[in-house]
Image (cartoon, grey):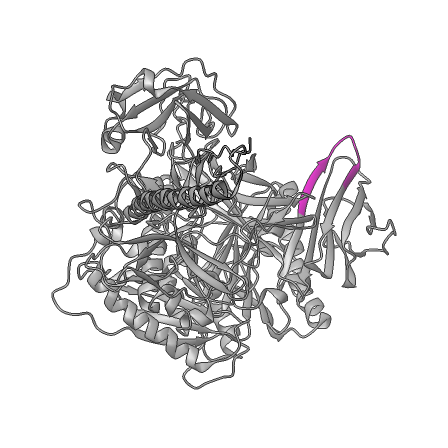
Amino acid sequence: MGLFRSSLYLLILCLLQGSNTSLIQLNNNGYEDIIIAINPLVPEDETLIEQIKDMVTSASTYLFEATEKRFFFKNVSILIPENWKENPQYKRPKHENYKHADVLVAPPTFPGRDQPYTRHFAACEEKGKYIHFTPDFVRGKKQNEYGPTGRVFVHEWAHLRWGVFDEYNEDEPFYSSKSKKIEATRCSTGISGMNKVYHCQQGNCIYKNCRIDPQTNLYTKDCQFFPNKVQKEKASIMFMQSIYSIVEFCNAKNHNREAPSLQNKKCNSRSTWEVISNSEDFKNSMPMVESPPPTAFSLMRTSHRVVCLVLDKSENMASFNRLNRMNQAAKHFLLQTIENGSWVGIVAFDSTAHIKSKLTHITGSNERIKLSESLPTEASGGISICSGVKTAFQVIREKFPQIDGSEIILLIAGEDNTVRNCMEEVIQSGAIIHLIAIGPSSEPAVIEMSSMTGGTHHYVSDQVQNNGFMSAFGSLTSGNIDLSQQTLQLESKGLTLTKDPWMNGTVIIDSTVGKDTFFFVTWDKQPPRISLWDPNGRQMGEFTEDKDSKMAYLTIPGFAKVGIWTYSLQAKVNPETLTVTVTSQVVNSVPPIIVNAKMNKDTNSFPAPVIVYAEIQQGYLPVLGVNVTAFIESKSGETEVLDLLDNGAGADSFKNDGVYSRYFTTYKENGRYSLKVQAQGGANIVTRSSQRPRNGALSIPGWTVDGKIEGKPSRSEINEDTQTTLESFSRTVSGGEFVVSNIPKFPLSDVYPPSQITDLDAKPDGDQITLTWTAPGDNFDVGKVQRYVLRISESILALRDNFDTALPVTITDLLPKEANSKETFVFTPGKILEENVTRIFIAIKSVDKSNLTSKISNIVQVPLFIPQADPSLEENRHNTRVNISILVLSVTGSVVVVSIILSTTIYILKKKKNESRPATSSIHDGVSDFKMDSIAEASGVLHITGFAPALKTG
């Protein structure tokens, strides 16, 4: 029986891998259950809904043709904010909410910054998180800058669904091609245009020829590529979908592998169509013969939150103090986390279900206290999960006939082989099931129920000091309301005290939070002595004690003082386990700092690694320089600690994007693992307020028409170097659970190679090349590698596909550093290359002590020649030289003529004077030889110096 349940558990998790994000399904070539959510901060505008429909409708046709008649948009739900007026066309959402939104229509990060982009921080071929459009973009007000909205939607959809990257690179807009010319980074190279500098000063704007930077031998940063407005080239959508002729993705035949595009860097120089063709969508579909049907739209308006707690009170809850720990966390949820205006009911179940509280409308503290007094107090009997869920449906229907969109928080601690009897009813009900599973023996089939209804699932171990109950309940905030109404967890900490009776700590309250701040303390045996001081050192009042539930709490009325709060707990018995949880609500005046945590997949099979992600933003801006720690707890309560990094190396895709990442490989046992992340910000925290999002549509710099540049779309220019310093802050979040299988019973030898080097960079310096990269580790990004293998080639494909046979570069003198350190290596290619080589491609691998080798790094290109500039620029240079020659000849001729005239004039004057003087008197005349000391070219003007006629008297 145990083996069967284990197999069932793994099967369910494999089927549900990645289901915690998007709800999109591909059905008969059509994408279903796409959610487009309008942010509550967007002012009400019904025409915006119609413009969303127009965008998706045109995108569906464009997508269908671009994918060779494979894919289209079948049905889309538009989620309308609760603060918009009711309309008979608007339905109540079922599983749709902001947490599952595929497209967000939200205000820009800065006024005027309307760039469409996709939040994608994973590897090539992995799905993105969401697409961000601004209202003005959807309204078509930015069409001159980005092109038609439907085309842009397809560009972003390719990021979101198939994990491809852009085929331009604003950091490296030009490169040296094999033809020895400077080319714009693009795909395909058939897209024609001109390279120019657009310069404005005091309202006057001109276009100038591009200049070459002597350090890079490429154009300077102010140079831009202006495509021809009329083109014949059809690819690629991932470069500039705004060009009218562009209707395809670059494929293996026309892909530009030379260009330093993000697509080449992240996808091993494969074309976008090659990546798309390798997707599960592509493999599970065939081209359609007929045209697709029009897209169907559903309008969903969010409304009040309806929640029913369904709590296990069976005999499984009697051990490990589970019932009381559940009640502590549930009381915190009811007293502080659940939002005002919500409806909440409570059902407890063992072998049968019992209504503890009908739906209650929360308007203040009285309703919260009354609900907290309705929790179960005894644990006994069997378990019937279906009984509890069906009774919750009854509680909800007594107030609301439709269950659609209602939430059930289901807490279970045991197995129940009758769950599938109600599975279909639950899935069809429209309710959302959030699961909190306690201990290693909880029913695995309920995870399927949770995932199929769009809910979340969490695992809580029996290790009290890990505070798992509080983290799980604390994550269950509404997915459909503005952040200003939500409660954020600042601290979640526990400690088992043995010798030292003190548990001391600090909590940072920053200026983005502080409303209704709530300190919550629990104990196992006796109430501790609790002291709390504000940032000024003033001690707070007494905590409210609930000795039966073994907890105490204190609310800071109004707004808590910004700064460092200090707490001190003294246990009265030994041993004792204490926990502290601190939450606070958002201050409305400024966007809060938000932390979200997740794993890259819900289930994993040994020895494959999983990746831990923590995304930290203020509004939609990345927050940098944060100390981020992940705590990963196994089902037996053992905890592994990881420091997450935003360094663009190893598991981290992009440096300084506010996403902190790390590989996790130190599995201890098969089964469930829970994730919790703590983020601490110190004085060096900055937001990259000027950073434009990656993975977004490229704006149109202007068009080339008949050899001239037409127009420059208006665009909000923001200083790229602007950084805003932030104050200190702290956050703690739950990242849910994941499952690991196939871990062997006995230890194995080394199975993890070093991680792939993804940030290799090359800089030519005279006849030498300087390479830099971030050091990998012995096991992915932990430890130190044994050695590096460096190879070069004249062919990028030869280096990529046959690395081991490429020309080696001796690198044995370089002693590898610890993982995540910066490595530097300098070599002279002329000593190892044949003559007449014009450029080389460079890549590197690393090898650990077990001789396990990493994947090949990103490939970098170094030109060994000075590339040719724009032909138009060379023509201008040639014309300049011709004009100067003509000018020199003209001036020289003029000088000769003037000299003759002057000489003649002087001769005549001398003769006349001689005739009028006595014979004894003589004059010696002479004209100094004229000379051109220099003929200098400055600003196109020829200067002649040294011409000096003189008269000598004797």
Image quadrant where one finds the C terminus = top right
Residue in the image at 54% along x and 32% along y: 920
Q: Residue 642 versus residue 553: which sits nearer the camera?
A: 642
- Within the image, what quadrant is residue 270 found in? top left
Left or right relative to 215: residue 323:
right
Visible residue check, residue 261 = no
Residue in the image at 49% along x and 70% along y: 406
Whole-percent x and y of residue 85? 51, 83
Task: Magenta stretch: give its range.
Answer: 492-504
User: Relative to 124, is 154 above or below?
Assistant: below
Q: Residue 552 versus residue 75: which sits nearer the camera?
A: 75
Q: Residue 368 versus residue 321: which sits nearer the camera?
A: 368
User: Relative to 950, is 786 above or below?
Assistant: above
Residue in the image at 85% along x and 51% along y: 536
Image quadrant where one finds the N terminus = top left
Q: Residue 503 versus residue 193: which sits nearer the camera?
A: 193
Left or right relative to 160: residue 485:
right
